[in-house]
Amino acid sequence: MDNQNLKVLLPREDIAATVRKLAADITRDYHDKNPILIGILKGAFVFMADLVRCLNFPLELEFVRLASYSGTQSTGQLKMLQTLPCPVEGRHVLVIEDIIDTGLTTAFIMGYVKTKSPASLKLCALLDKPARRCAPVDIDYLGFTVPDRFVVGYGLDYDQKYRNLPDVCVLEAKP
Ligand code: XMP
Ligand code: MG
């Protein structure tokens, strides 16, 4: 940890403007649908908290918890640590992710929700890191595309650290 630097990639003001834009798009599409927004813990918690406070219509919130990462490397293993506690059959579901990297986590969760027969299923992600994609993922609402660097802050962690940073930062080795 001591041999790493943080460099701001997405300042908080840019994130806030983008969250407002995403919220406007989501409002247009969901204002009369009483959707269920499913946040993927832990990373999406800050994004989800800011996003839903810009949504002024009836909706419900749920969370699922998956684990696929240890440090900055994917372990390649996906574990469902907390499943969906409510029925989503016949409901309009919007999954909220922090970042799509290989796409494996998102493909897994979208497949899981699909088996529960929602009326519709879409994906909203704050960040897309397409460089290492190996599972195809359609992102319906996207904030930013980021380069192939490990990013932290605004909910994103490095070994559970830095989630509380207000900006999205790149974690770099010190020269
Ligand atoms: P996959 O590869 O399955 O990864 O698309 C999605 C999950 O991996 C985590 N992830 C990151 N977390 N900085 C992080 O803090 C990153 O640059 C990064 N890339 C992937 C994240 O938890 C995401 O939900
Ligand atoms: Mg993580």
Image (tube, helix red, strand yellow):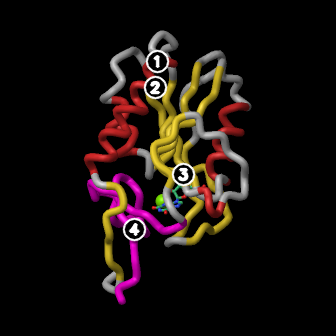
User: Which amino acid type is shown beneath numbered disc 3?
Assistant: Asp
In the image shown, does 159 or 4 lie closer to the viewer? 4
Cα separation between marks 3 and 1: 22 Å
Whichever of callouts 4 and 3 sits on the residue coming sooner in the sequence is 3
> Where's the N terminus, which quadrant?
bottom left
- According to the picture, the residue beneath numbered tag 2 turns out to be 25
Marks 2 and 1 close (CB-CB < 8 Å): yes
Q: Quadrant of residue 165?
A: bottom left
User: Reading the chain from its start, which is encountered first: label 2 or label 4?
Assistant: 2
The quarter of the picture where the C terminus appears is bottom left
Q: Identify the residue position indicated by label 1 in the image.
A: 28
Helix or strand or loop: what does disc 1 sit on?
A: helix
Q: Quadrant of residue 119?
A: top right
Q: Residues within 10 Å of mark 2 (few under 14, many from 20)?
A: few
| Magenta-highlighted residues | 148-175
Is residue 54 positioned above or below 74 on the image?
Answer: above
Identify which amino acid the numbered label 4 is placed on: Val
Contact between marks 2 and 3 (CB within 8 A): the answer is: no
Q: Indicate the amino acid at tag 1.
A: Arg
Q: Secondary structure at mark 4?
A: strand
Residue at the spot 44% in from the left edge and 46% down from the top edge: 44
Q: Which mark is residue 170?
A: 4
